Image (cartoon, rainbow, N blue to C red):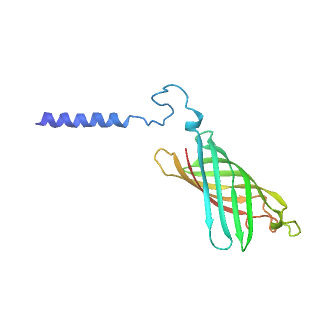
Amino acid sequence: MKARAVFYIVFIAFFSSAAMGQRYLDDDTDDYNYGQPPKVSEKKVFYGGSIALTFSQPVFFSVAPVVGYQVTRIYNVGIGIPYIYTNNFGQKSNLLGFRYFNQLLFFRGAMLHLEYEAMNYPRVWTDGTAGIKSRSFEHSVNAGLGYRQYLTARQSVWVDLYLLYNAKWRSGVSIYSSPFILRTMIAFK
């Protein structure tokens, strides 16, 4: 009886440790391409963005898809195309822009975030003498801190939260009401 119990204990201990030594399929190599480097599109590219919607006055809708590339484990770059629609008591506006960002993760999800943004907007927002059809670009340099929370064990889905400061913001001239930006983004790879 004791020999059988010892056999089961050794058997379970051996196979449980062997199971822990197995690797995930999304490691740097897979079973079919062993020894070959991973494809760029499989391991390094991530997609995501954010959506915002309010129904009060002004009515506000924003969507900002992003595509990024993980250069190293701690450094990411990417681009985004933010779109904003507003309706403030019948005054409707569409804003479309371009965003380029850099992220440096430095401690347990904490990161530095730096981005350049150019938004096309109606000039009447900042210049009351401009015509209704006249449009212009506002260029912003946003820098600040962020935090990344992974939602999966393999770190393939995450949520980012940023607190940014617009270094080019000027009161009364900017399309934004404050130099501080609070933004969230969900992404996956």
In the image: residue 77, left or right of residue 23: right
Q: Is residue 64 above or below residue 173?
A: above
Looking at the image, the residue that sits furthest to the right is: 129
In the image: residue 66, left or right of residue 6: right
In the image: residue 108, left or right of residue 85: left
> Could you say which is closer to the camera, residue 144 or residue 135?
135
Residue 37: quadrant of the picture: top right
Query: Residue at horizontal 70%, vertical 66%?
Result: 86
Query: Residue at horizontal 59%, vertical 34%?
Result: 40
Q: Position of residue 101 (x, y in %)?
A: 69, 48
Query: Residue at horizontal 89%, vertical 69%?
Result: 129
Looking at the image, the residue that sits furthest to the left is: 1
> Could you say which is closer to the camera, residue 181 or residue 51?
51
> Could you say which is closer to the camera, residue 120 or residue 162?
120
Q: Position of residue 112 (x, y in %)?
A: 65, 51
In the image: residue 63, left or right of residue 31: right
Q: Position of residue 137 (x, y in %)?
A: 81, 56
Q: Is residue 186 above or below residue 130?
A: above
Which quarter shows the N terminus?
top left
Q: How many marks?
A: 0
Q: Position of residue 127 (x, y in %)?
A: 86, 67
Q: Is residue 59 above or below residue 95?
A: below
Which quarter shows the C terminus?
top right
Query: Residue at horizontal 83%, vertical 58%?
Result: 136
Residue 20: quadrant of the picture: top left
